[in-house]
Image: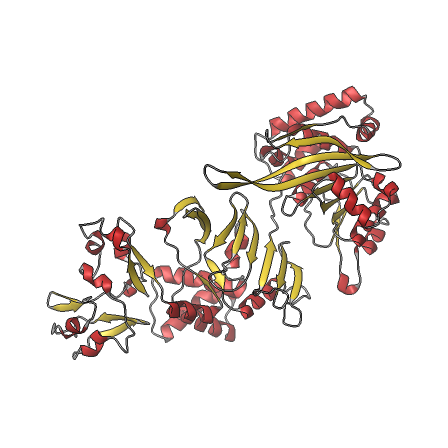
């Protein structure tokens, strides 16, 4: 560890404000101290009074009671970094006695000083715990957003996600943490005894921690024992949608996808493949799946519903990887989707009536476009008393209905989507949700529900960039043209980055870009009802509905004109309701009273 000075910035100051803040009353030349290896330090070797001692691992300080002011250390220092003050030799001890809170750094008005870690310090922390949170000079960055868990900053045109609640550990802190952790795991301590474990170990080793150190030691230990290390904080942040690792080392930091800022580099990285393997297997502790050399690829679900995919070499060429698609407990309502311009109020009102008209709907789109979020919101229009069967490979749907049965595939026991579809038809369902369909078996399972003729509508999501592409994909999987008529609507949702060339910044957007009904006898084709205008950033009508309109007229016993008036009426209601904030359950209850 050492202090680094940016000379150009330092020249801007003539008042030495940094040294005015120094608790040891040092002069500016003290900042030149390179903090030599204690066993080889010329100053310590020259001191005949034995006044030099190692105040922290690798850092020397001078005991003023032993110092006789002979000046031998001053002569021996090749950097002229020691001075005589009050007949006592004084040198920089990096404020080790003050929990490394550097008064000179805080006192510099030009950000000319920074705390630098040596490579061996990095390596020691990496070897000890297998990952590292590294420091970032926030004074050189522009803060874009600050929360309890993190700070999002911009520096040199790039945005970063900084872990606020996790400390940047020194080598001695990492070693101490490992010792306490090993002792805790070998003892009969319970969860609430973590604080006692820290206190007992420090007492035995005659180590005194500062108040701030005690707090973050407790937080880190808690995350290591009962959480997922640095991932603990990332999983708690509701503004993050994805967490990704693309390899080992500082050049490949953790990456997070923020719902407002997109992909950001995090100030944390993994340095050990075994640490990655251990943390992934800890995520999957409640499942039968494990990541290992013999099984270098795994998919699973965390206890909170988040999805995780992880790989090891040779599957991932550049090192271990994992991707966590976070599950958000706070589901978005149709009102929120209107607020953030994913939908227009008119389109949402139209879909409100299609759900009540027992139409079957597929939500298509690219990765991360919000397909599941949209489907979850649309299903809040399903009447409260109806029975819903949700069948998913990865459980993601969270519906407010009390009469909802959730089923999940279990391929290790031979329980596939088709088996559950067959079971669901014996459960007297009103609505059937298939979840995401990606492969032939899943698509055919969806078609089976449509052809069975039971229930009041089936729903699914799939990857496709247009309604036409969705049809082509299903035909590729072997779906017959006549069977496609069982699908009433295809919604296409897209995620893209719109770049502001003046600011050189990208803004993430999610919009419904197409709504089409499937019609035709010999050749089923998509007929666009709504399409998106990218220039105006809004969706508008393309063609009046035919197939869906007939269903609406039958469902409500209304003429075409009166159905259109009902859509306008409900669009106005949604516009009125969107001004307030309400949860999905609150919105659902409001619909029940409508």
Q: Residue at x 62, y 27 (%)?
A: 575
Residue 435, visible in the rendered structure: yes
Left or right, 258 with reference to 559: left
Which one is nearer the viewer's eye here, 122 or 575? 122
Which one is nearer the viewer's eye here, 210 or 397? 397
For the N terminus, the image quarter is: bottom left
Q: Residue at x 16, y 71 (%)?
A: 74
The correct choice, above or below, for 501 with respect to 108 in the image is: above
The correct choice, above or below, for 199 with respect to 212 in the image is: below
Residue 41, how many percent across, how many down? 25, 75
Which one is nearer the viewer's eye here, 492 or 548? 492
Q: Residue at x 39, y 68 (%)?
A: 119
Which one is nearer the viewer's eye here, 305 or 52? 52
Residue 454, visible in the rendered structure: no
Q: Residue at x 27, y 49 (%)?
A: 110
Left or right, 7 with reference to 149: left
Outermost residue toward the front in this view: 501
The correct choice, above or below, for 371 with respect to 547 in the image is: below
Residue 185, how many percent across, how many down? 51, 72
For the C terminus, the image quarter is: top right
Number of marks present in the image shown: 0
Residue 102: image quadrant is bottom left
The correct choice, above or below, for 498 with respect to 163 in the image is: above
Residue 452, how many percent across, how many down? 88, 45
Residue 59: image quadrant is bottom left
In this figure, which colouring scheme has been used for the structure?
Answer: secondary structure
């Amino acid at each position: 560890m050492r202090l680094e000075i940016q000379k150009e910035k330092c020249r801007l100051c003539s008042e030495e404000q940094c040294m005015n803040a120094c608790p040891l009353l040092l002069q500016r030349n003290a900042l030149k101290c390179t903090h030599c290896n204690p066993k080889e330090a010329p100053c310590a070797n020259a001191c005949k009074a034995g006044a030099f001692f190692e105040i922290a691992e690798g850092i020397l300080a001078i005991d003023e009671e032993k110092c006789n002011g002979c000046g031998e250390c001053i002569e021996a220092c090749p950097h002229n970094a020691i001075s005589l003050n009050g007949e006592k030799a004084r040198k920089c001890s990096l404020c080790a006695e003050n929990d490394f809170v550097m008064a000179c750094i805080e006192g510099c008005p030009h950000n000319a000083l920074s705390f630098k870690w040596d490579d061996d310090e990095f390596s020691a922390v990496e070897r000890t715990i297998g990952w590292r949170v590294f420091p970032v000079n926030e004074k050189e960055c522009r803060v874009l957003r600050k929360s309890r868990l993190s700070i999002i900053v911009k520096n040199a045109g790039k945005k970063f996600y900084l872990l606020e609640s996790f400390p940047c550990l020194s080598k001695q802190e990492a070693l101490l943490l490992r010792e306490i952790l090993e002792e805790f795991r070998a003892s009969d301590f319970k969860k609430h005894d973590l604080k006692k474990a820290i206190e007992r170990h420090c007492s035995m080793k005659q180590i005194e921690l500062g108040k701030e150190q005690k707090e973050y030691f407790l937080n880190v230990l808690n995350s290591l024992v009962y959480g997922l290390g640095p991932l603990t904080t990332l999983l708690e942040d509701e503004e993050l949608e994805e967490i990704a690792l693309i390899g080992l080392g500082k050049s490949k930091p953790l990456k997070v996808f923020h719902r407002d800022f997109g992909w950001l580099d995090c100030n944390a990285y993994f340095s050990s493949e075994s640490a990655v393997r251990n943390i992934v297997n800890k995520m999957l502790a409640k499942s039968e799946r494990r990541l290992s050399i013999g099984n270098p690829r795994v998919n699973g679900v965390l206890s909170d519903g988040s999805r995780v995919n992880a790989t090891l070499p040779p599957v991932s060429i550049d090192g271990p990887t994992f991707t966590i698609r976070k599950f958000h407990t706070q589901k978005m309502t149709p009102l929120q989707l209107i607020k953030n311009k994913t939908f227009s109020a008119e389109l949402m009102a139209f879909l409100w009536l299609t759900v009540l008209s027992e139409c079957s709907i597929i939500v298509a789109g690219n990765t991360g476009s919000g397909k599941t979020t949209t489907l979850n919101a649309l299903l809040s229009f399903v009447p409260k008393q109806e029975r819903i069967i949700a069948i998913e490979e990865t459980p993601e749907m969270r519906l407010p209905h009390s009469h909802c049965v959730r089923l999940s595939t279990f391929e290790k026991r031979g329980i596939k989507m088709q088996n559950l579809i067959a079971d669901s038809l014996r459960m007297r369902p009103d609505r059937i949700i298939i979840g995401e369909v990606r492969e032939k078996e899943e698509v055919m399972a969806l078609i089976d529900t449509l052809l069975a003729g039971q229930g009041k509508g089936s729903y699914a999501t799939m990857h496709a960039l247009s309604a036409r592409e969705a049809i082509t994909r299903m035909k590729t999987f072997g779906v017959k043209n006549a069977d496609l008529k069982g699908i009433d609507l295809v919604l296409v949702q897209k995620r893209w980055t719109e770049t502001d060339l003046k600011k050189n910044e990208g803004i993430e957007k999610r919009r419904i870009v197409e709504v089409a009904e499937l019609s035709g006898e010999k050749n089923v084709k998509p007929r666009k009802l709504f399409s998106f205008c990218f220039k105006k950033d809004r969706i508008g009508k393309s063609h009046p509905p035919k197939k869906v309109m007939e269903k609406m007229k039958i469902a409500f016993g209304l003429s075409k004109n009166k159905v259109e008036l009902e859509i306008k009426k409900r669009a106005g209601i949604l516009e009125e309701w969107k001004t307030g904030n309400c949860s999905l359950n609150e919105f659902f209850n409001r619909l029940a009273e409508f």
